[in-house]
Amino acid sequence: MTTKHRLHFKQIFTLLGLVCLLSLFLLSPVNVSAQAISAAKLDALKAELVTEIDKQQKMTQEMVDMVFSFGELGFQEYETSKYLTDILKKNGFKIEMGIAGMPTAWTATWGSGKPFIAIGSDIDCIPKASQKPGVAYHDPIIEGAPGHGEGHNSGEPLNITAVLALKKIMEREKIAGTIMLWPGVAEEQLGAKAFFIRDGYFKNVDACIFTHVGSGLGTSYGGGGNGLVSVEFSFEGEAAHAAGAPWKGRSALDAVELMNHSWNMHREHMETDQRSHYVITDGGDQPNVVPSKASVWYYFREGSYPKIMKMYQDGIKMAEAAASMTDTKMSYKVLGSAWPRNMNKTLAETMFENIKQVGIPKWSDDDQTLAKALQKEMGSEERGLSTTIASSLRVPVPIAQAAGGGGSDDIADVSWNLPTITLSYPANIPGTPGHHWANAVAMATPIAHKGVTAGAKSQAMTLLDLFVKPEIIKEAWTYFNEVQTKDIKYKSLLSATDKPAVHLNKKIMDEFRPQMKQFYYNPAKYKTYLEQLGIKYPTIRTSSTQVGE
């Protein structure tokens, strides 16, 4: 073969190789970039998402009502988790149950490649918050039973609605990326998310969008709220006949009371931003037996890691002193923890643009009547439901200067480890106390159904932006590294040996679950949970309605 022929064949093989590579590129799913999707095409896809989510309103309503009817407390969300993961499994998601040592915790993943987006919401409820939906005064389904007096029945239905609509488009358009849905187990005990972080479930995640019920449609960035550590102190003494030979006993309850008295005296000398509170979880068995065992459960809340740890250490000192004074033994265990929140500006700005397109739902006269009647019942301003969204994102206080006080949410631990925001959606009524039966009134009514649908649209549109605009993820991480975590670095409030407190709430659910099962929603028989319960919407107090009825 001549040199000329060898060159000819080399050129042919080179050309064939280029053709093969081009074919592989064209036939393989690729991560669609901003250059590959025009602004007009992106707008069209978002309009399609809105249409698809509107078509799913019946499914959304059923999910919201079903989870409401389960009413499960933290670490006991067995029915809720099974129901939600069954839906996801049927739609092609891979389920991993029992993550981080929690039987009711799970991940549901679909897709492949980057970006890897996590989507979460809480699923637990509130003790003694049982309430008939659509009734604007206290009327429990089961007296003393748990109920969704926070509205956590609505967040995962929102996420599932949004993701199933988005999944259709991603499959058709060959948009690469991975979706991971996950639940906020035992959020009311701040019992799960720090463990998820510690155990590596967010290690490869690029961004997280969380959803939480509210009375408006919005999001924010920066710092806010308190962090906390949740600790149970247990004392062990010696039992004795409280009348016959009390001198032979050593009261563990005395130790609990001494610790509580010490802490209450200590409050006078603490900074005003702190929040601390406790319940006695074991105060003994009966008065004529000196309590050999007693326990008290504390939440120590403050606005920074050092201040939280200082409170925690002070609590340990007081517990040790109380044990010394009563000649008892003391032990303690962490039941949960959370940092103060630290949300991402880039993600919040992206979400807010979509929120402006979606807007507040159109409320009916019945929706507003229920809202105003409940506000009157609660002694709040009778202003009804929100009808507008904020004109701009709130300018946050710098994280180092964020005021303390208020509640805590362990989504904060996620927010310190990767770009994260929380979407608040209008499924509840303004002017309610929080952690209360009143916060359950709207949560299986058209108010919640409409609010979840509006939230799902905002969620899905924002997720689409993240999957097709890689510059958003890049900018989010730049802000995360150069602003969010520039001066303050995350250090878990958990130790390597702390374990989730999965025993919490078991006795309560064991007591009430058999009664509650009779009231689980049956969507095959009833269009809505209101219909199943025989509730006329809205039901409001009249002159003949007795207080406390």
Image (cartoon, helix red, strand yellow):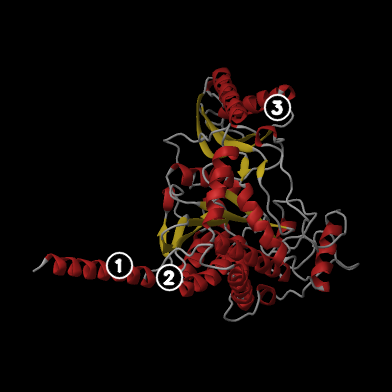
C-alpha gap between disc 2 and disc 3 = 53 Å
Label 3 crowd bin: few (<14), some (14–19), many (20+), radius 10 Å:
few
Of pointers 2 and 1, the one earlier in the residue sequence: 1
Q: Which residue is labeled 2 in the image?
A: 92
Q: Please give the name of the residue rendered at 66% of the width and 32% of the height, measured from the top-left corner.
A: 400
Q: Is mark 3 on a helix, strand or loop?
A: helix
> Foreground: 165 or 366?
165
Mark carried by residue 18 = 1
Amino acid beneath label 3: Asn
Reading the image, the residue beneath label 3 is: 264
Question: Which residue is the extreme one toward the right?
Answer: 543
Q: Where is residue 362 in the image (x, y as percent from the top left)?
A: 77, 71
Q: In this view, does 227 lie above or below 43?
A: above
Q: Which of marks 2 and 3 is nearer the N terminus?
A: 2
Callouts 1 and 3 close, C-beta under 8 Å: no
Structural distance between the alpha carbons of marks 2 and 1: 36 Å
Residue 539 screen position, x and y as percent:
80, 70
Q: Tell me if I can see residue 285 in this picture.
A: no
Residue at 59%, 69% (x, y): give it. 42
Estimate the x, y position of residue 429 in percent, counting from the top left: 77, 60
In the figure, residue 401 lies in which quadrant?
Answer: top right
Q: Does residue 534 appear to the left or right of 372 in the view shown?
A: left
Q: Quadrant of the C terminus?
A: bottom right
Asked whether the beta carbons under mark 2 and mark 3 sit within 8 Å of each other, the answer is no
Q: Which amino acid does label 2 sit on?
A: Gly
Residue 369's tag is none
